Amino acid sequence: MNTLLVICFSFGYLALLFGVAYAAERRSAARRSLVSNPYVYALSMAVYCTAWTYYGSVGRAAYFGLEFIGIYLGPTLMAPVAWLVLRKIIRICHVQRLTSIADFISARYGKSAALGALVTVVCVLGVVPYISLQIKAIAASFDILTGGGQGSMLAEGTVASSSALITTGALAFFTIIFGVRSVEATERHEGMVLAVALESLVKLVAFLAAGLFVTFGLFKGFGDVFEKAAAVPDLSRLFTLDGAGTSGPQWFTLLVLSMSAILLLPRQFQVSVVENVNENHLRKAMWLFPLYLIIINLFVLPLAFGGRLLAGQSIDADTFVLALPLQAGHPWLALLIYLGGLSAASSMIIVETIALSVMMSNHLLMPLLVRLPPARAESPSWFAYLGQVALHSRRLAVVVVLLLAYGYYAAVGHLLPLVNIGLVSFAAVAQFVPVVLGGLYWKGGTRQGATAGILAGFVVWFFTLVVPTMVGPNLLPSSILEQGLGGWSGLRPFALFGLTGLDYLSHGLFWSWFFNVGLYVGVSLLRMPSALEQRQAVEFVDVFHYRTGFEGPAGWQAGAPLPDVRALLTGFLGKKRTSQALHAFAERFPEVPDASENVATAQADPRLLAYAEKLLAGSIGPASARLLLSSSVGVEDISFDNVVGILRESQQLLEANRQLQKQQRQLQRLTGQLQVAYNQLQELDQHKDEFLYTVTHELRTPLTSIRALSEILTDNPDMEEEERHRFLLTITKESERLSRLITLVLDLEKYESGRATLEKSLVDVPDVLHDALESVGQLLRDKQIQLDVVVPPGLPLLPGDRDRLMQVLVNLLSNAVKSCRADGSGRISVVAEASADTLRITVEDNGKGIDPEFHQLIFDKFFQARNQTMRKPEGSGLGLAITKKIVELHAGRIWVESQPEQGARFSFELPLPVNERMSE
Amino acid sequence: MPTTPHILIVDDEPNIVMSLEFLMRKNGYRVSIARNGTEALEAIKQSPFDVVLLDVMMPDVDGYEVCRQLRQLPGQSHTRVIFLSAKSKEADIQKGYDAGADLYIPKPFSTRQLMTTIKELIGTNV
């Protein structure tokens, strides 16, 4: 095709994208964002699919079958985990205003500037070759389309450097106007995101067009392609994973690497974390993005097989996508596909370069600048100057990164096999996995541990994955591969420490992570995290506990003059943003003196300083922000002891809070117990009243007779002698009844209060029974009651108080007598029986019986009080209560079985000492 | 001469019945005796009484109930009811008056005072 035409289309396309981006930012300014939705978010994540996907997948598939799918499976498998890990990273970055993976790691480990610089260097070294691969892809595809260069493209390229240089320049220009226009990096690049999303759509459509064309245009559908491929032995081999020669460890490595990459590649971090508008967009993106990956990979195999069937070895497999339509005479379709490839490459370059430039500026340049002597001059113009420097340095960084990429391409790119550059990049980024995951979930990691881990991982990565690539182009002697570094066979890049049997990528990943994780954990455990590290650890690991960026321990001591802080912020953020930010702060903390008002003498609140630090971190990175604030505003960074003090204080507060809650629960429990006790007391009090009442009532009855009869005797001296005698006898009886009652009451009181003691001896049961029957003998005879006594011989001796047991028996017997009729039909039977460990005595009568509802109550001394108008058949109402007490004192139990008019059977059981049964 | 006043003594304590019976006879009254609530109810249905001396706590039907039923009977419209009870709480006494008692005397009582009261009641009745 006409070169000019292609150039026009290329620039036209990029200009169109810029137009879209520009419009998006205008709309965003008018608060009608086109970007704030999960679809754009998911599409922008598809920046993951670069020219490597676009051209390289087909190339890989043509010789290695399904292996290419590995790096798309990883992100797909990651999707469910994203909600846990990615959301946490997003939350942390928004709270702490972090704008890159370097920010993240540096901030996590004590805002270390050195660590940030190290991460930046690793990123740049790891990713620049990847960018050069994109540049090369654009240049090569341009040459193929214009017929400028023939043959291979991604491998062993001989592409005209001019195309690449022009490409580089154009991309630098677009990157700068797309992404580096504002100094505050946390201000999202809505225009860029929309452009990237659009590019993702274009590359998808173009790739599908290529796939459809080959599958349905050049062949007769999927079945046709695969059937024909199956007929060729070299291709049919690719139908199985085994035949394609991809081993298990290799698959695993691909999955792990791509999982790391989707999270931590600078460009992925940029689109999925920094550019995230709303955490909830993640929910849709979690399935939309994997869906995109599946769709774009649908036609990879048909294209690969189609290419191999049609073109054979004459065309480089990496160019099939573009070359097949061109060969078939469809230049316009080829142009579309070229634009798709341009989309894939340019979106990657733009996002990656922006991310890298921010990192370089914030972590390589700013830490140096804020330490310069003028920084201590507390001059607002210096801050404003620094803000400008930050912006310019980023633009410069864009150019530097792209020049590095171009330089790499021009110097060694044409010498190196670029096929695996992408995966080697992934492996470099994977060196951040331990410190990032550790930083998210483990509070013990330290700056030294993280530095050692990354450094070690990076060195091993370089030795095992980069060094071998330098042997091919004769940059290094091949003896390194065979004999090892310095001739020591333990240091062979492909068989480090003698480890063989793994493919070189798995081998490199294994050893680099081995040392990385080992040193990270090991060195971290060597010493306690510093105060700052501890605080950051808490803010990272427990990020979901803090609601806004305003919260968390401040870490600054008051002391900085307020105007200085404001001037510092104005320098970086501009007047408008500064006053907006300070107003937001004032709304959150109304008690802090309003920082937006001009009070020259005011001191900045520690919380305001922490807030300012975060605002600045958004512009120049966390480490630089901290340095800047402490050196230029003149505030004292809080000392270790102070932070420990603050931490201890907050721990004490927490502890006190817990104690309070515990005490509150205890109080509630106590209140409940008190309530119960009070109720019991009240009930007891009532019982006592009732008892007293019952007792006095019982006393009144004999007293009434005594008084009445005495008065009669006094008033009637002329009474008949017989009657007089009868009255006097009655008075005596009633007096006896009265004293019996009093004795019973006192007895009962003794049992109730627990003062009663038993005078224990070994009691001969038949003997006591005999005595008891003797004492009620007269009563029995009076009522003509028939008595049956069953006492088996050989009853064991019973340990107990003989007199008390006698009292029990007499009580039960007299109750039985009272309940029997006096007409001679009364029967009472007494049975004693012993089992292995108890002795039971039963007293049964055939009297009027007791209603079951009273079976418990009759043993209650208050029984009569409760049935105040219904007199208990006969007796004091205290006898059974006392009987029960005595039985219980002997650790026994007593109960009654009865029905009204059916007689009653009272039984009590007393425990026998084990193995002390009386022998014959 | 008016007819001899007829007194009903209701109590389940034989010794108290004994003393009351002696007192009433000594004063020339006719005496009937009921040893529980059921007997008392039967008695009041059969003949009118001038005075009923009524215990409250009895094994079957209590004194309050006897009094209430008595007040329903047309034949007993002039009957005076005196409760003699060991239940001496304010509430018990009130309950007695609510049931229709003319007098509520707590036990133990003075026989002399009781006789004076009975004579007064019978006097107004006549």
Image (cartoon, rainbow, N blue to C red):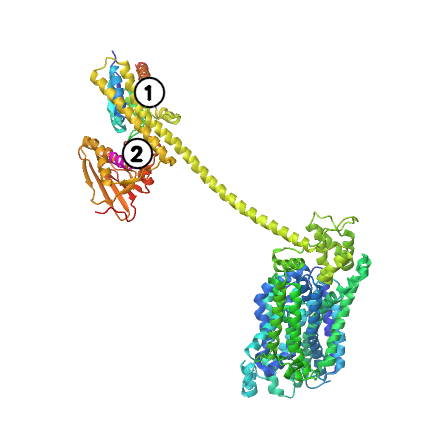
The answer to whether residue A275 shows anywhere in this view is no
The quadrant holding residue A215 is bottom right
Q: Chain under label 1?
A: B
Instruction: Measuring from the top left, give residue A29's x and y in whole percent.
Output: 72, 60
The quadrant holding residue A773 is top left
Per the picture, the main secondary structure of the magenta-coloured stretch is helix
Residue A736 colored in magenta in the image: no
Residue under label 2, please give it.
A879
Name the one closer to the observer, A793 or B10. Answer: A793
SS for tag 2? Answer: helix
Residue under label 1, please give it.
B109
Kind of residue at disc 1: Phe
Residue A809 colored in magenta in the image: yes
The answer to whether residue A429 shows anywhere in this view is yes
The vertical placement of A896 against A518, above or below, is above
Kind of residue at disc 2: Gly
Q: Which residues are magenta?
A: A804-814
Instruction: Measuring from the top left, give residue A896's x and y in whole percent.
Output: 28, 40
Name the one closer to the observer, A294 or A386. Answer: A386
Instruction: Measuring from the top left, give residue A142's x and y in whole percent.
Output: 72, 80
